[in-house]
Image (tube, rainbow, N blue to C red):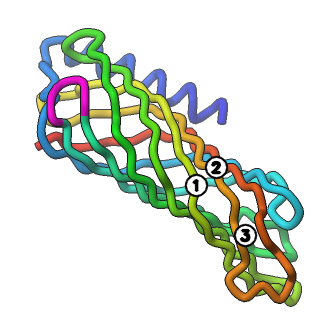
Amino acid sequence: MNKLSIVAISLLSALATAQASAANDTTGFYVGGALNKVTLDGDDVTDSRSGTGLGAYGGYNFNEWFGLEANLFATGDLGDKDIDVSAGALSFTPKFTAQINDIFSAYAKVGIASMAIVLDGNGIDEDLTGFGWTYGVGVNAAVTEHLNIRVSYDVTTGKLDADDNYLGLKDIDTDIKQFAVGVHYQF
């Protein structure tokens, strides 16, 4: 995570100084993708695991301080040599943005999420699903009038139940934390 943090901060700084005259388009639709460092914390079967994930996000900014955003992400294998573990979530949030200057803005969001974890291996083939809450913060930097880079930290938390429940897995408290670097196009 330290390497990803250093790369993200360096990239934001370099692009901000190179494009100091770019004015950020702050209203309308936007769509983008992200590379995530994901940590999965949960009781019992889903003990703390981390790995890389990919995400897609998009939304609509009604004005320069308020918008709605959807975020979909999934991870690769977070498991060990005996069991494969993957996670994903789809969230919907209102997003509140504070413009720092023409290039930088900071935002916070909170909303609802649908979560899923898939366990496979050692005789286990289980899908855990449920609903929960998501919240996050981030910094956005305008590279050009329409192209933006952002660094964000999101937490999705909820209780998951097994779909087939032959293992007796019920009400598993789960947290999925993401540190992400994303790029999006503001229409």
Question: Answer yes or no: do the residues labelled 1 and 2 have beta carbons within 8 Å?
Answer: yes
Q: Secondary structure at mark 2?
A: strand
Q: Give above or below for 179 relative to 102.
A: below
User: Mark 2 highlights which residue?
Assistant: 157
Mark 3 / mark 2, whichever is N-terminal:
3
Kindly identify the amino acid type of the residue bearing the numbered disc 1: Gly
Q: Residue at x 24, y 24 (%)?
A: 65
Between 150 and 116, the one lying in front of the other is 116
- Left or right: 57 as drawn, with respect to 157: left
Query: Where residue 116 appears, x then y in whole percent?
Result: 60, 68
Q: Comparing marks 3 and 1, which lies closer to the viewer? A: 1
User: Mark 1 highlights which residue?
Assistant: 132
Q: Residue at x 57, y 29 (%)?
A: 5
Kindly identify the amino acid type of the residue bearing the numbered disc 3: Val
Q: Give above or below for 87 relative to 113.
A: below
Q: Residue at x 23, y 27 (%)?
A: 143
Kindly identify the amino acid type of the residue bearing the numbered disc 2: Thr
Q: Residues within 10 Å of mark 1 (few under 14, many from 20)?
A: many
- Left or right: 68 as drawn, with respect to 47: left
Mark 3 / mark 1, whichever is N-terminal:
3
| Extent of the magenta region | 62-66
Q: Give above or below for 169 relative to 2.
A: below
Q: Comparing marks 3 and 2, which lies closer to the viewer? A: 2
Between 158 and 137, the one lying in front of the other is 158
User: Mark 3 highlights which residue?
Assistant: 85
Query: Where residue 86 appears, x then y in whole percent?
Result: 66, 68
